[in-house]
Image (cartoon, rainbow, N blue to C red):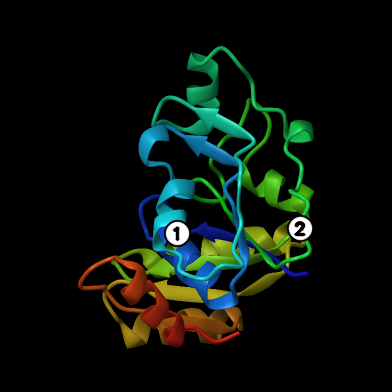
Amino acid sequence: MAKYFITGIGTGIGKTLISAIVTEKLQADYWKPIQSGDLDISDSLTIGSLITNTKTVIHTESYRLTQPLSPHLSARLDGIEIDLNQINMPETTNNLIIEGAGGLMVPLNETELIINLIKKLDAEVILVSQNYLGSINHTLLSLNLLKQYDIPVKGIIFNGDENAETERYILQYSQVKKLGYVPHLIEINQEQVAMAGECISF
């Protein structure tokens, strides 16, 4: 069983879409440990609506927070504190896709960040990068931090506007494997998600 933690170089750069594509491609299980806000249109519900295979199981979130804010603040407003000891890997023999919240340094409580959760779960990281001015810096900073924490990186998936030079520089400098590039999808639906899986190679 492989455990892949999908995180991004920032917020709003396509983690959920990439999670859907990888989940469908591998027919893996999916788990979002912490959902912060948008409970009626949660990432787990979105993934479930985009998956067509019958093998994938969507596991229940450990924390369902009501406010679309940083998890530490959303939890505080809900009158609770996120405890990493209460976040336990779901039982499965299938490959598991774990989706984070925001980037690596997103706070979960006063002392712990998303990267601490990744370390606890002992998962291999798939880093989602999007091509924009500044993305080289953000991507290399993320990779450097993962290296400092001795967290293995399966590879990078680029998405959005294609920029060959940006991708070339990141890959040659980091020596991390490119798993694929996913272009802008005309529509985000089951058919497009399944087809986009052809853009990714493990």
Q: CA distance from mark 1 to mark 2?
A: 22 Å
x, y (%) of residue 21?
46, 71
x, y (%) of residue 198?
44, 87
Name the quadrant of the C terminus.
bottom right
Residue 52 seen in render:
yes
x, y (%) of residue 129?
43, 68
Identify the residue position indicated by label 2 in the image.
92
Mark 1 or mark 2, which has the lower sequence index? 1
Which label number is shown at residue 15?
1
* Label 1 SS: helix
Name the quadrant of the N terminus.
bottom right
Amino acid type, label 2:
Thr
Q: Residue furthest top?
A: 79
Residue 38 seen in render:
no
Residue 187 position (above or below residue 42): below
Q: Residue at 47% x, 34% y: name it.
A: 36
x, y (%) of residue 155?
59, 76
Q: Residue at 29% x, 67% y: name it.
A: 132
